[in-house]
Image: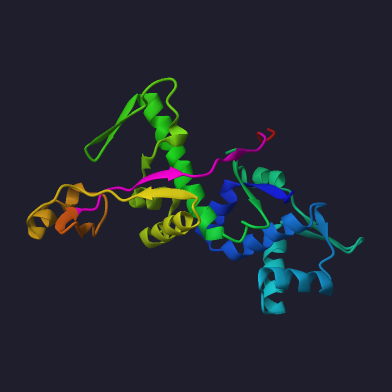
Amino acid sequence: MTPEISVPIQLFIDAQQKGYAKKLQFFLSLKLIYKCGKAKLDDGELLFLELTEEISSRKTTLKYIDFLVEKGWLQYNNRTGYYIIKSFERIRSENNWKLRLSYPVDFYSYRNIKAITGAIIYGYLHKDFWRKVRRKKSVQIKGSTYHFLSPNFNYIEAPAPLSVLGICRIFQISPSTASRLKEAAEKQKLLQVKKNYGASVPSKKAMELCLDYNDKRNNIVIYQGNYRFQLIDTILPLFLFKKRKKLKT
């Protein structure tokens, strides 16, 4: 059975916001390889990591290690000569990350950092959207009304309208980054994305007058031979989050 680790979703989000996704990937490789929680990281082990991670320079490897030491996620024990790899629970506690959702990764998936991050961001908002619909019974977005149909309604199988600009505001990332993350997750079959378009309008100029009422800045497109507004994508996650333990208070 392939070893699997359950990674707090805030790690992926924080890495995206602060620009250390590659270093997070390296850290996840350590967590997967050294299940005992410690590593010597001598020349032989570093060479193996470099081959695994396709790192061409020892300088880059040492840069990653220095970053993790500075973060406190690797701690060198002078007495034993081993690096201690900090647990996810300690990292959560130190950052006060109370959200329990996590994403499972293994040796086959952990390198897809961009796709995983996109899946997490859109998947979390999908979950949040249907939670709000359930609380309010219905939510209207851009003329479409979404109902939480019955106690037996399974939101896991229901797509949700998720705005790129909304993603940007919530997670402090650029529209282009939000779009690339979505595309990466869709390519890895972690998200199902449906493009939506408004009714055809004969004049592009008339459409431009209406842009203030739409979700995207440049969303006039030609679809099926007519000018249309490109509406909010509806998105369905094709994975399930896992849950970690509650943080001790």
> As displayed, is residue 156 above or below residue 210?
above
Camera-side residue of 50 and 61: 50
Give the position of the C terminus as an image quadrant: top right
Left or right of 215 in this view: 67: right
Q: Position of residue 92 (x, y in %)?
A: 65, 45
Camera-side residue of 12 and 72: 12
Q: Residue farthest to the right?
A: 79
Q: Position of residue 3 (x, y in %)?
A: 73, 50
Q: Residue farthest to the top?
A: 151
> As displayed, is residue 123 above or below residue 21?
above
Please report the bounds of the magenta region as a residue range.
229-245
- The image's colouring method is rainbow
Q: Position of residue 161 (x, y in %)?
A: 34, 42
Q: Position of residue 237 (x, y in %)?
A: 47, 44
Residue at the image position 68 percent from the left and 57 percent from the top: 107
Q: Residue 158: name its quadrant.
A: top left
Residue at the image position 34 percent from the left and 24 percent from the top: 137
Answer whether residue 244 is magenta in the image.
yes
Residue at the image position 73 percent from the left and 55 percent from the top: 32
Residue at the image position 68 percent from the left and 72 percent from the top: 63
Camera-side residue of 123 and 188: 188
Numbered disc total: 0
Answer whether residue 116 is magenta in the image.
no
Q: Residue 49: name its quadrant.
A: bottom right
Left or right of 9 in this view: 236: left
